[in-house]
Amino acid sequence: MTATDVVTAVLVPLGALFTLIGTIGLVRFPTLLNRMHAATKPDTVGLLLIITGAAFQLPDVRSAAPMFLAAMFQFVTVPVLAQTVGRVSYSRGMVDSERLVVDELEEAVRTTRDDD
Amino acid sequence: MTEGMDTSSAGASTSAVTTRSAGMRLLGRLPTVLWLTLMWVVLWGDPSPGTVIAGAVVGSLCYTVAKLPHIPVRLGFRPWHALRLVGVIGYDLFRSSVHVAFHVLWRPAEVRGAIVAVPMRTDSDFLLAMVSGGLSLVTGSLVIELNRDQGVIYVHGIPIESDGAVDRLRRQVRRTEELFVRAFGTAEDVAEFERGDLGAQGEDR
């Protein structure tokens, strides 16, 4: 077992663990917004770790390039998805206000309505 | 002063769209086509001339079919600050993942969050888009709404139990904004940001 094998052996299971926890969070968190957190962050880290771990097994940098493209697209698309779902769920009133310590958006919406 | 400059540049760009010559239009599209070509070559994993030409053709075709709008990108780039940004975002991403992972396993039903409004100090569309993207990616935060007129960003964060955590989230959002502005803002953006920063500090006191 070489040094690169050790790196792979550490990174890939660790990435899989993060992804697993993210998925468990998706099931266990009670609200949609919390689920979005669980679905986005640990999964991104997990994918990044798996990709990095797998890249160490490749013969040269050239064959690793598409994997880093995959990581890049993950970084670009995940925030868009999270933001869209978050926004739609909020505007449709699917956010449980009892689980929020502060909700300054609600205050802002109310002020705007009063103005109209 | 800034508003005046913005409207004048917006006016200039709309008139430029109609009067710009075909050559100029081609030149403006070149970076996107080059980028698409690069993606193509990387995906094929083979930088031979045939692949490059095929990529350029496909890229140009996609560009024509999709009728992508030409947006004048006004961004700066400071390598040192960009490196700092990558470091901080990477660290935040990892830390927030561990944080969220812990709460997934330990009493997820009791986790509470908060939605805070954070006024942004920059007024550049690109920077705002980058900041909200970066925020949604990390720091246990999720951008829900962006009030473009007032430049206010609404962020949902977990886990938040107290007012202290709310303040921490607010500080984190502001720090992320500063990192993005310093890494990718033009000199104008940075100057405007610093003016807004001084104004915000004055309000706090």
Image (tube, coloured by chain):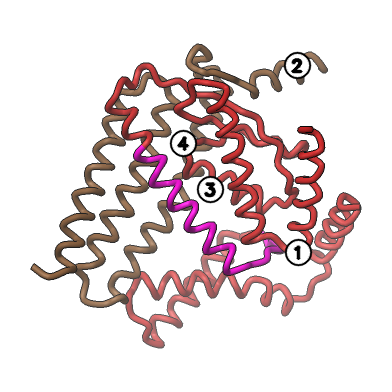
Chain colours: A brown, B red
Q: Secondary structure at mark 2?
A: helix
Q: Circle 1: is it few (<14), some (14-19), or many (20+) Cα within 10 Å? A: some
Q: Which residue is mark 4?
A: B140
Q: Which residue is mark 3?
A: B134
Q: Which mark is residue A113?
A: 2
Residue type, mark 2 in image = Arg
What secondary structure characterizes most of the magenta part? helix
Q: Which range is magenta? A: B69-98
Distance of mark 4 from mark 1, alpha carbons? 30 Å
- Same subunit, labels 3 and 2: the answer reads no
Residue type, mark 3 in image = Gly
Distance of mark 1 from mark 2, alpha carbons? 38 Å
Which chain does the numbered disc 4 sit on? Answer: B
What is the x, y in percent for residue B112? 45, 20
From the image, state whether disc 4 or disc 3 is nearer to you: 4
- Same subunit, labels 4 and 3: the answer reads yes
Q: Which residue is mark 1?
A: B187
From the image, state whether disc 1 or disc 3 is nearer to you: 1
Q: Secondary structure at mark 4?
A: loop
- Which mark sits nearer the N-terminus, 4 or 3? 3
Instruction: Identify which residue is drawn at 71% across, 22% down.
Output: A108
Q: Name the one closer to the observer, B35 or B16.
A: B35
Quarter in which the C terminus of chain B is drawn: top right
Q: Circle 2: is it few (<14), some (14-19), or many (20+) Cα within 10 Å? A: few
Which chain does the numbered disc 3 sit on? Answer: B
From the image, state whether disc 3 or disc 2 is nearer to you: 3
Instruction: Identify which residue is drawn at 49% across, 53% down.
Output: B88
The part of the image, by quadrant, that contains residue B199 is: top right
Residue type, mark 4 in image = Gly
